[in-house]
Amino acid sequence: MQTKSLIQTVANVIKITELKKGDVVKIIEEEYSSNAIYYGVVIDLLNTGSKSFIQIVRYKKVYSDIKADVILINGEKDIALFPATPDEIKEHLSASISSIEKDIDKEKEELQKKIEALEKAKQFVSGETSKQLTEPSFTEMTQIDFNNEKKEKELKMAELMD
């Protein structure tokens, strides 16, 4: 059985009877050796009397991304154009929108870290940070003096324990 025969026997024919700016549509186009689904919004309808055009912003889900472009359809070429609902578009694109939002949030966070690191580096190079830096206090002693001081502390600790 051919798929075409099966579809034609069970699916109703859909014919758009009126189209206006703001209508949402589903467009099926052949790409390479398969069909692709686009969802779009009619942004303009043009008619010269002898030629007519539809301008559509269309969106295509590509993995977890969304590609958008503007197309101009002339009235001379057949196109598979079907009605759609805003809810259908929302359902189709919502997972991709969520994924894109997560990616943006992650990249914002990474960018903020880079901005902060850059500011700190600029402050250090310009000397602003070095004005706030201090030098720790220290004493220098020979190894013999250090060992003697250590022994004295150990003796004091032993006396306190007794």
Image: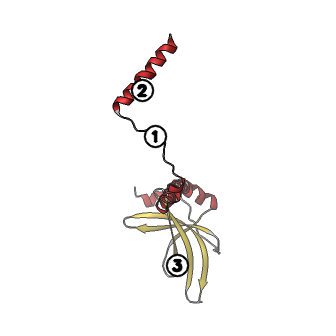
x, y percentage for residue 72? 52, 78
Q: Colour mode?
A: secondary structure
What amino acid does circle 3 point to? Leu
Q: Residues within 10 Å of mark 3 (few under 14, many from 20)?
A: few
Distance in Å between CA atoms under marks 1 and 2: 15 Å
Q: Secondary structure at mark 3?
A: strand
Q: Decide if residue 67 is in sight here.
A: yes
Q: Decide if residue 103 is in sight here.
A: no
Distance in Å between CA atoms under marks 3 and 1: 78 Å
**Residue that appears at 43% across and 64% down:** 35
| Residue mark closest to the camera, 3 vs 1 | 1
x, y percentage for residue 139? 44, 38
Q: Quadrant of the N terminus?
A: bottom left
**Residue that appears at 65% across and 71% down:** 22
Residue most extreme to the left = 143
Q: Which residue has dot 1 on it?
A: 138
Distance in Å between CA atoms under marks 2 and 3: 89 Å
Q: Residues within 10 Å of mark 2 (few under 14, many from 20)?
A: few
Q: Which residue has dot 3 on it?
A: 72
Q: Quadrant of residue 92?
A: bottom right
Q: Residues within 10 Å of mark 1 (few under 14, many from 20)?
A: few
Q: Which residue has dot 2 on it?
A: 149
**Residue that appears at 39% across and 35% down:** 141
**In this picture, is 46 found above or below 22?**
below
What amino acid does circle 2 point to? Glu
